[in-house]
Protein backbone atom coordinates (compact mmCIF):
# COMPACT_ATOMS: atom_id res chain seq x y z
CA UNK A 1 0.00 0.00 0.00
CA UNK A 2 1.57 3.34 -1.08
CA UNK A 3 1.31 6.64 0.74
CA UNK A 4 -1.06 9.09 -0.92
CA UNK A 5 0.38 12.31 -2.32
CA UNK A 6 -0.94 15.35 -0.44
CA UNK A 7 -0.54 18.71 -2.21
CA UNK A 8 -0.20 22.04 -0.45
CA UNK A 9 -3.52 23.65 0.48
CA UNK A 10 -4.36 26.55 -1.79
CA UNK A 11 -7.00 29.27 -1.66
CA UNK A 12 -9.10 28.79 -4.79
CA UNK A 13 -10.76 32.19 -4.81
CA UNK A 14 -7.99 34.66 -3.92
CA UNK A 15 -4.74 35.61 -5.60
CA UNK A 16 -3.21 36.58 -2.23
CA UNK A 17 -2.65 33.13 -0.71
CA UNK A 18 -1.87 34.31 2.82
CA UNK A 19 -3.73 37.48 3.81
CA UNK A 20 -7.40 36.57 3.76
CA UNK A 21 -10.81 38.10 4.36
CA UNK A 22 -14.42 37.04 3.79
CA UNK A 23 -15.40 33.63 2.49
CA UNK A 24 -12.43 31.58 1.25
CA UNK A 25 -12.25 28.21 -0.44
CA UNK A 26 -9.45 25.89 0.73
CA UNK A 27 -8.48 23.36 -1.91
CA UNK A 28 -6.13 20.37 -1.63
CA UNK A 29 -5.36 17.55 -4.07
CA UNK A 30 -4.77 13.92 -3.14
CA UNK A 31 -3.06 11.66 -5.63
CA UNK A 32 -2.47 7.90 -5.71
CA UNK A 33 -4.79 7.16 -2.83
CA UNK A 34 -5.05 3.42 -2.17
CA UNK A 35 -8.67 3.62 -0.98
CA UNK A 36 -11.61 6.04 -0.85
CA UNK A 37 -11.74 8.98 1.55
CA UNK A 38 -14.38 8.57 4.24
CA UNK A 39 -13.89 11.48 6.59
CA UNK A 40 -12.29 14.92 6.46
CA UNK A 41 -11.22 16.77 9.61
CA UNK A 42 -10.70 20.51 9.42
CA UNK A 43 -9.29 22.66 12.18
CA UNK A 44 -8.59 26.39 12.23
CA UNK A 45 -8.52 29.22 14.77
CA UNK A 46 -9.57 26.92 17.65
CA UNK A 47 -12.54 25.44 15.72
CA UNK A 48 -12.83 21.84 14.50
CA UNK A 49 -15.33 20.20 12.15
CA UNK A 50 -15.50 16.71 10.59
CA UNK A 51 -17.18 16.08 7.25
CA UNK A 52 -18.25 12.99 5.35
CA UNK A 53 -16.56 12.61 1.97
CA UNK A 54 -19.75 13.60 0.09
CA UNK A 55 -19.63 17.04 1.67
CA UNK A 56 -16.22 18.09 0.44
CA UNK A 57 -14.58 15.58 -1.91
CA UNK A 58 -14.66 15.75 -5.72
CA UNK A 59 -13.14 12.79 -7.57
CA UNK A 60 -11.31 13.25 -10.83
CA UNK A 61 -10.31 9.56 -11.11
CA UNK A 62 -10.57 6.58 -8.71
CA UNK A 63 -7.27 7.35 -6.97
CA UNK A 64 -7.09 11.11 -7.34
CA UNK A 65 -9.42 13.67 -5.85
CA UNK A 66 -9.82 17.18 -4.63
CA UNK A 67 -10.83 18.22 -1.13
CA UNK A 68 -12.68 21.52 -0.91
CA UNK A 69 -13.91 23.26 2.22
CA UNK A 70 -14.95 26.84 2.86
CA UNK A 71 -13.88 29.10 5.68
CA UNK A 72 -16.09 31.98 6.79
CA UNK A 73 -13.02 33.88 7.88
CA UNK A 74 -15.27 36.56 9.39
CA UNK A 75 -15.65 34.17 12.33
CA UNK A 76 -11.92 33.57 12.83
CA UNK A 77 -9.84 35.81 15.06
CA UNK A 78 -8.03 38.55 13.14
CA UNK A 79 -4.30 37.86 12.84
CA UNK A 80 -2.13 34.82 12.06
CA UNK A 81 -3.52 31.30 12.30
CA UNK A 82 -3.05 27.84 10.73
CA UNK A 83 -5.64 25.74 8.90
CA UNK A 84 -5.16 21.99 8.95
CA UNK A 85 -7.05 19.41 6.90
CA UNK A 86 -6.63 15.64 7.23
CA UNK A 87 -8.25 12.73 5.44
CA UNK A 88 -9.28 9.31 6.78
CA UNK A 89 -9.39 6.55 4.18
CA UNK A 90 -11.61 3.48 4.00
CA UNK A 91 -8.60 1.20 4.61
CA UNK A 92 -8.02 2.85 8.01
CA UNK A 93 -5.07 5.00 6.94
CA UNK A 94 -4.92 8.70 7.51
CA UNK A 95 -3.00 11.52 5.83
CA UNK A 96 -2.81 15.28 6.38
CA UNK A 97 -2.11 18.21 4.11
CA UNK A 98 0.71 20.47 5.35
CA UNK A 99 -0.74 23.16 7.67
CA UNK A 100 -1.76 26.30 5.78
CA UNK A 101 -0.67 29.59 7.37
CA UNK A 102 -3.21 32.40 7.08
CA UNK A 103 -3.35 36.00 8.21
CA UNK A 104 -6.99 36.91 8.77
CA UNK A 105 -8.20 40.49 8.44
CA UNK A 106 -11.92 41.30 8.58
CA UNK A 107 -11.78 44.58 10.40
CA UNK A 108 -14.11 46.86 8.43
CA UNK A 109 -17.28 47.87 10.34
CA UNK A 110 -19.39 45.90 7.85
CA UNK A 111 -17.19 42.82 8.37
CA UNK A 112 -17.62 43.06 12.13
CA UNK A 113 -21.41 43.33 11.80
CA UNK A 114 -21.50 40.38 9.39
CA UNK A 115 -19.49 38.24 11.84
CA UNK A 116 -22.02 39.05 14.56
CA UNK A 117 -24.95 38.11 12.30
CA UNK A 118 -23.33 34.78 11.38
CA UNK A 119 -22.71 33.96 15.05
CA UNK A 120 -26.34 34.68 15.97
CA UNK A 121 -27.55 32.66 12.97
CA UNK A 122 -25.40 29.71 14.07
CA UNK A 123 -23.28 29.61 10.90
CA UNK A 124 -19.87 28.28 11.87
CA UNK A 125 -16.48 29.29 10.44
CA UNK A 126 -15.87 25.89 8.78
CA UNK A 127 -18.28 24.98 6.00
CA UNK A 128 -18.51 22.21 3.38
CA UNK A 129 -17.90 22.61 -0.36
CA UNK A 130 -21.34 23.96 -1.30
CA UNK A 131 -22.43 27.38 -0.07
CA UNK A 132 -26.13 28.23 0.03
CA UNK A 133 -28.23 31.29 0.88
CA UNK A 134 -29.70 29.40 3.87
CA UNK A 135 -26.37 29.92 5.64
CA UNK A 136 -27.11 33.65 5.90
CA UNK A 137 -29.76 35.51 7.93
CA UNK A 138 -31.12 37.64 5.07
CA UNK A 139 -34.29 38.47 6.99
CA UNK A 140 -33.19 38.56 10.62
CA UNK A 141 -29.62 39.81 10.30
CA UNK A 142 -28.75 43.28 11.58
CA UNK A 143 -26.27 44.10 8.80
CA UNK A 144 -28.21 45.87 6.04
CA UNK A 145 -27.25 47.94 3.03
CA UNK A 146 -27.93 51.55 4.03
CA UNK A 147 -29.00 52.39 0.46
CA UNK A 148 -31.76 49.75 0.58
CA UNK A 149 -33.10 51.14 3.86
CA UNK A 150 -33.53 54.80 2.86
CA UNK A 151 -36.34 56.47 0.95
CA UNK A 152 -34.41 57.67 -2.15
CA UNK A 153 -34.55 61.30 -3.18
CA UNK A 154 -36.59 61.58 -6.35
CA UNK A 155 -34.51 62.42 -9.40
CA UNK A 156 -35.42 62.20 -13.12
CA UNK A 157 -34.54 59.02 -15.01
CA UNK A 158 -31.56 59.70 -17.28
CA UNK A 159 -29.00 57.85 -19.42
CA UNK A 160 -26.74 60.90 -19.78
CA UNK A 161 -23.53 61.56 -17.91
CA UNK A 162 -24.34 63.50 -14.74
CA UNK A 163 -22.54 66.68 -13.68
CA UNK A 164 -21.00 65.17 -10.55
CA UNK A 165 -20.60 62.07 -8.34
CA UNK A 166 -23.34 63.26 -6.00
CA UNK A 167 -25.93 63.17 -8.82
CA UNK A 168 -24.67 59.71 -9.82
CA UNK A 169 -25.22 58.41 -6.27
CA UNK A 170 -28.76 59.84 -6.14
CA UNK A 171 -29.58 58.22 -9.48
CA UNK A 172 -28.26 54.83 -8.35
CA UNK A 173 -30.29 54.99 -5.14
CA UNK A 174 -33.47 56.02 -6.98
CA UNK A 175 -33.29 53.97 -10.19
CA UNK A 176 -30.91 51.12 -9.39
CA UNK A 177 -28.25 52.28 -11.85
CA UNK A 178 -26.26 55.38 -12.72
CA UNK A 179 -23.77 56.70 -15.24
CA UNK A 180 -20.50 58.04 -13.84
CA UNK A 181 -19.50 61.65 -14.64
CA UNK A 182 -16.12 60.62 -16.12
CA UNK A 183 -15.60 58.41 -19.17
CA UNK A 184 -12.85 55.84 -19.59
CA UNK A 185 -10.03 57.57 -21.56
CA UNK A 186 -9.97 56.79 -25.30
CA UNK A 187 -6.27 55.84 -25.01
CA UNK A 188 -7.09 53.05 -22.51
CA UNK A 189 -9.88 51.74 -24.75
CA UNK A 190 -7.43 51.65 -27.67
CA UNK A 191 -4.81 49.87 -25.59
CA UNK A 192 -7.34 47.30 -24.36
CA UNK A 193 -8.82 46.69 -27.81
CA UNK A 194 -5.35 46.01 -29.23
CA UNK A 195 -4.41 43.72 -26.29
CA UNK A 196 -7.70 41.85 -26.61
CA UNK A 197 -7.25 41.27 -30.33
CA UNK A 198 -3.76 39.96 -29.79
CA UNK A 199 -4.84 37.70 -26.91
CA UNK A 200 -7.60 36.19 -29.07
CA UNK A 201 -5.21 35.73 -32.02
CA UNK A 202 -2.62 34.01 -29.85
CA UNK A 203 -5.23 31.79 -28.14
CA UNK A 204 -4.52 33.28 -24.68
CA UNK A 205 -8.21 34.22 -24.50
CA UNK A 206 -10.92 32.05 -25.99
CA UNK A 207 -13.33 33.70 -28.40
CA UNK A 208 -15.04 32.46 -31.53
CA UNK A 209 -15.50 35.33 -33.98
CA UNK A 210 -19.03 36.55 -34.64
CA UNK A 211 -20.54 34.81 -31.61
CA UNK A 212 -22.08 36.18 -28.41
CA UNK A 213 -19.52 34.20 -26.43
CA UNK A 214 -18.38 35.90 -23.25
CA UNK A 215 -14.65 36.31 -22.78
CA UNK A 216 -13.58 35.59 -19.20
CA UNK A 217 -10.28 36.68 -17.71
CA UNK A 218 -9.63 39.79 -19.87
CA UNK A 219 -8.65 41.44 -16.58
CA UNK A 220 -5.47 39.33 -16.67
CA UNK A 221 -4.28 41.59 -19.52
CA UNK A 222 -2.45 44.65 -18.23
CA UNK A 223 -4.88 47.09 -19.87
CA UNK A 224 -7.85 44.95 -18.74
CA UNK A 225 -6.60 45.11 -15.17
CA UNK A 226 -6.44 48.93 -15.42
CA UNK A 227 -10.12 49.00 -16.42
CA UNK A 228 -11.04 46.44 -13.73
CA UNK A 229 -9.30 48.35 -10.93
CA UNK A 230 -10.09 51.82 -12.33
CA UNK A 231 -9.53 54.24 -9.41
CA UNK A 232 -12.63 56.32 -10.23
CA UNK A 233 -14.90 53.29 -10.17
CA UNK A 234 -13.28 52.10 -6.95
CA UNK A 235 -13.71 55.53 -5.33
CA UNK A 236 -17.36 55.66 -6.36
CA UNK A 237 -18.06 52.16 -5.02
CA UNK A 238 -16.26 52.92 -1.80
CA UNK A 239 -18.62 55.78 -1.04
CA UNK A 240 -21.62 53.74 -2.23
CA UNK A 241 -20.83 50.65 -0.12
CA UNK A 242 -19.28 52.67 2.73
CA UNK A 243 -16.80 49.80 2.75
CA UNK A 244 -13.73 48.81 0.72
CA UNK A 245 -14.69 47.56 -2.77
CA UNK A 246 -13.14 44.36 -4.18
CA UNK A 247 -13.15 43.33 -7.84
CA UNK A 248 -14.64 39.91 -8.56
CA UNK A 249 -14.62 39.08 -12.29
CA UNK A 250 -14.97 40.51 -15.79
CA UNK A 251 -16.96 39.52 -18.87
CA UNK A 252 -15.91 41.01 -22.17
CA UNK A 253 -18.32 40.91 -25.11
CA UNK A 254 -17.42 41.64 -28.72
CA UNK A 255 -21.10 41.25 -29.64
CA UNK A 256 -24.31 41.58 -27.64
CA UNK A 257 -24.82 38.86 -24.99
CA UNK A 258 -28.55 38.32 -25.79
CA UNK A 259 -28.82 37.27 -22.15
CA UNK A 260 -32.37 37.03 -20.78
CA UNK A 261 -33.55 39.60 -18.24
CA UNK A 262 -32.08 38.70 -14.84
CA UNK A 263 -31.02 39.92 -11.42
CA UNK A 264 -27.30 39.30 -10.81
CA UNK A 265 -28.25 38.45 -7.22
CA UNK A 266 -28.63 34.75 -8.00
CA UNK A 267 -25.21 34.51 -9.71
CA UNK A 268 -23.08 37.04 -7.80
CA UNK A 269 -24.51 36.94 -4.34
CA UNK A 270 -23.62 39.11 -1.37
CA UNK A 271 -24.51 38.77 2.28
CA UNK A 272 -25.88 41.21 3.35
CA UNK A 273 -28.00 41.79 0.23
CA UNK A 274 -27.03 44.85 -1.78
CA UNK A 275 -23.25 44.77 -1.41
CA UNK A 276 -22.46 43.89 -5.03
CA UNK A 277 -22.46 46.17 -8.07
CA UNK A 278 -22.04 45.53 -11.79
CA UNK A 279 -20.03 48.12 -13.75
CA UNK A 280 -20.58 48.09 -17.51
CA UNK A 281 -18.17 50.00 -19.76
CA UNK A 282 -18.92 50.72 -23.43
CA UNK A 283 -15.77 50.20 -25.50
CA UNK A 284 -17.38 51.67 -28.62
CA UNK A 285 -20.43 53.85 -29.37
CA UNK A 286 -23.36 51.44 -29.02
CA UNK A 287 -25.50 51.26 -32.17
CA UNK A 288 -29.22 50.45 -32.38
CA UNK A 289 -30.02 46.76 -33.10
CA UNK A 290 -26.52 45.65 -32.04
CA UNK A 291 -27.86 43.74 -29.02
CA UNK A 292 -27.84 46.65 -26.59
CA UNK A 293 -27.69 46.21 -22.83
CA UNK A 294 -31.15 46.85 -21.40
CA UNK A 295 -32.23 47.70 -17.87
CA UNK A 296 -35.53 47.91 -16.02
CA UNK A 297 -35.16 51.21 -14.14
CA UNK A 298 -36.27 50.94 -10.50
CA UNK A 299 -36.38 47.12 -10.56
CA UNK A 300 -33.66 46.85 -7.90
CA UNK A 301 -36.61 47.12 -5.50
CA UNK A 302 -38.18 43.92 -6.88
CA UNK A 303 -38.15 40.71 -4.83
CA UNK A 304 -34.75 38.99 -4.77
CA UNK A 305 -34.84 35.53 -6.28
CA UNK A 306 -32.66 32.84 -4.71
CA UNK A 307 -31.81 29.43 -6.15
CA UNK A 308 -33.03 27.42 -3.12
CA UNK A 309 -36.33 29.32 -2.93
CA UNK A 310 -37.00 28.51 -6.60
CA UNK A 311 -36.16 24.82 -6.05
CA UNK A 312 -33.07 25.12 -8.28
CA UNK A 313 -30.16 22.77 -7.64
CA UNK A 314 -26.60 24.09 -7.80
CA UNK A 315 -25.35 24.02 -11.40
CA UNK A 316 -21.97 23.70 -13.06
CA UNK A 317 -22.20 24.18 -16.84
CA UNK A 318 -25.83 23.51 -17.66
CA UNK A 319 -28.18 26.36 -16.77
CA UNK A 320 -31.18 24.90 -18.65
CA UNK A 321 -33.15 24.62 -15.38
CA UNK A 322 -32.96 28.43 -15.15
CA UNK A 323 -36.01 28.78 -17.43
CA UNK A 324 -37.85 28.79 -14.07
CA UNK A 325 -35.83 31.80 -12.95
CA UNK A 326 -36.32 33.60 -16.31
CA UNK A 327 -40.10 33.15 -16.10
CA UNK A 328 -40.15 34.42 -12.52
CA UNK A 329 -38.15 37.54 -13.50
CA UNK A 330 -40.59 38.22 -16.37
CA UNK A 331 -43.49 37.82 -13.98
CA UNK A 332 -41.93 40.23 -11.45
CA UNK A 333 -41.35 42.86 -14.16
CA UNK A 334 -44.94 42.62 -15.43
CA UNK A 335 -46.45 42.60 -11.97
CA UNK A 336 -44.34 45.60 -10.85
CA UNK A 337 -45.07 47.58 -14.05
CA UNK A 338 -41.35 48.03 -14.78
CA UNK A 339 -40.40 49.08 -18.31
CA UNK A 340 -37.42 47.92 -20.32
CA UNK A 341 -35.02 50.61 -21.61
CA UNK A 342 -32.23 49.98 -24.14
CA UNK A 343 -28.89 51.60 -23.33
CA UNK A 344 -26.96 53.27 -26.18
CA UNK A 345 -23.92 54.93 -24.62
CA UNK A 346 -20.91 56.61 -26.17
CA UNK A 347 -17.55 54.84 -26.02
CA UNK A 348 -16.04 55.03 -22.53
CA UNK A 349 -19.30 55.66 -20.73
CA UNK A 350 -19.47 53.79 -17.40
CA UNK A 351 -22.74 52.44 -16.01
CA UNK A 352 -23.02 51.10 -12.46
CA UNK A 353 -25.92 48.87 -11.42
CA UNK A 354 -27.26 47.79 -8.06
CA UNK A 355 -26.95 44.07 -7.31
CA UNK A 356 -30.66 43.45 -7.82
CA UNK A 357 -31.39 45.62 -10.89
CA UNK A 358 -32.99 43.54 -13.65
CA UNK A 359 -31.00 43.77 -16.90
CA UNK A 360 -29.92 41.72 -19.91
CA UNK A 361 -28.88 41.83 -23.57
CA UNK A 362 -31.35 42.78 -26.36
CA UNK A 363 -31.62 40.51 -29.43
CA UNK A 364 -28.88 41.09 -32.03
CA UNK A 365 -31.18 42.22 -34.82
CA UNK A 366 -28.29 43.33 -37.05
CA UNK A 367 -25.68 40.62 -36.60
CA UNK A 368 -23.01 42.64 -38.46
CA UNK A 369 -22.92 45.23 -35.68
CA UNK A 370 -20.49 44.63 -32.83
CA UNK A 371 -21.11 45.79 -29.24
CA UNK A 372 -17.69 45.80 -27.63
CA UNK A 373 -18.04 46.11 -23.86
CA UNK A 374 -16.53 44.95 -20.59
CA UNK A 375 -18.51 44.39 -17.41
CA UNK A 376 -16.90 43.93 -14.00
CA UNK A 377 -18.58 42.93 -10.75
CA UNK A 378 -17.54 44.21 -7.33
CA UNK A 379 -18.35 43.26 -3.73
CA UNK A 380 -17.83 45.09 -0.46
CA UNK A 381 -14.87 43.64 1.45
CA UNK A 382 -16.85 43.17 4.66
CA UNK A 383 -19.64 41.22 2.91
CA UNK A 384 -19.70 37.50 2.16
CA UNK A 385 -19.36 36.95 -1.62
CA UNK A 386 -20.60 33.74 -3.23
CA UNK A 387 -22.28 32.42 -6.38
CA UNK A 388 -25.66 31.15 -5.24
CA UNK A 389 -26.41 29.43 -8.59
CA UNK A 390 -23.15 27.44 -8.41
CA UNK A 391 -22.80 27.18 -4.62
CA UNK A 392 -19.24 28.51 -4.77
CA UNK A 393 -17.28 31.09 -2.81
CA UNK A 394 -16.71 34.27 -4.85
CA UNK A 395 -13.30 35.29 -6.20
CA UNK A 396 -12.22 38.71 -4.96
CA UNK A 397 -9.26 40.97 -5.56
CA UNK A 398 -8.35 44.00 -3.46
CA UNK A 399 -6.67 47.12 -4.77
CA UNK A 400 -2.98 46.84 -3.77
CA UNK A 401 -3.31 49.81 -1.39
CA UNK A 402 -6.17 48.10 0.46
CA UNK A 403 -4.51 44.67 0.76
O1 LIG B 1 -23.59 42.81 -21.30
C1 LIG B 1 -24.69 42.25 -21.27
O2 LIG B 1 -25.39 42.17 -22.28
C2 LIG B 1 -25.19 41.61 -20.00
C3 LIG B 1 -24.11 41.43 -18.99
C4 LIG B 1 -24.62 40.97 -17.66
O3 LIG B 1 -25.74 40.69 -17.45
C5 LIG B 1 -23.70 40.89 -16.51
O4 LIG B 1 -22.49 40.87 -16.72
O5 LIG B 1 -24.15 40.84 -15.36
FE1 LIG C 1 -26.00 40.37 -15.30
Image (tube, rainbow, N blue to C red):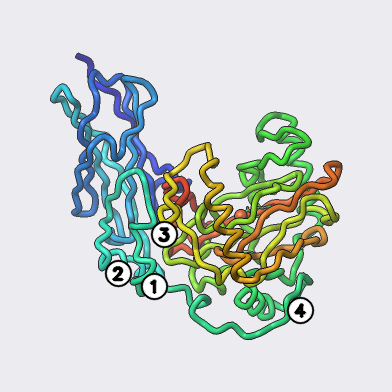
Name the N-terminal-most of marks 2 and 3. Answer: 2
Q: Secondary structure at mark 3?
A: strand
- Return the residue at label 3: 384
- Return the residue at label 1: 143
Q: Secondary structure at mark 2?
A: helix
Q: Residues within 10 Å of mark 3 (few under 14, many from 20)?
A: many
Task: Judge whether residue 239 can be spotted in this image.
Answer: yes
* 235 relative position to 87: left or right: right
Q: Is mark 1 within 8 Å of ligand 1?
A: no
Mark pair 2, 3: CA separation: 13 Å
- Return the residue at label 4: 163
Q: Residues within 10 Å of mark 4 (few under 14, many from 20)?
A: few
- Asked whether disc 4 touches disc 1, contact meaning CB atoms under 8 Å apart, the reply is no
Name the N-terminal-most of marks 2 and 4. Answer: 2
* 182 relative position to 49: left or right: right
Q: Secondary structure at mark 1?
A: loop
Q: Position of residue 364 (x, y in %)?
A: 78, 47
Name the N-terminal-most of marks 1 and 3. Answer: 1
- Who's the residue at 34% across and 54% down the image? 103
- Return the residue at label 2: 116
Q: Position of residue 120 (x, y in %)?
A: 26, 68
Name the residue nearer the viewer: 43 or 147: 147
- Who's the residue at 31% across and 20% down the image? 63
Amino acid sequence: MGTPGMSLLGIGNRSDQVRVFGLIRLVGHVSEASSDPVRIDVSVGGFEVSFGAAECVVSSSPNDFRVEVNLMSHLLPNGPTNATVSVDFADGSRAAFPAKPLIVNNNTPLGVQVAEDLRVHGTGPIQPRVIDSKMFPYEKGKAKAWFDEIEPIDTPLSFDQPADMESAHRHLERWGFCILPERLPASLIEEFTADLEEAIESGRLQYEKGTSQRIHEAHRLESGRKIWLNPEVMAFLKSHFRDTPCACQTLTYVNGSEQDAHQDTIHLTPYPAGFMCGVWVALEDVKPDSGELFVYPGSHKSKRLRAGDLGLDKVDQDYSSYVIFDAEVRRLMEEGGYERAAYRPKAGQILVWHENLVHGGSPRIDREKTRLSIVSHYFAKGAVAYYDSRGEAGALELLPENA
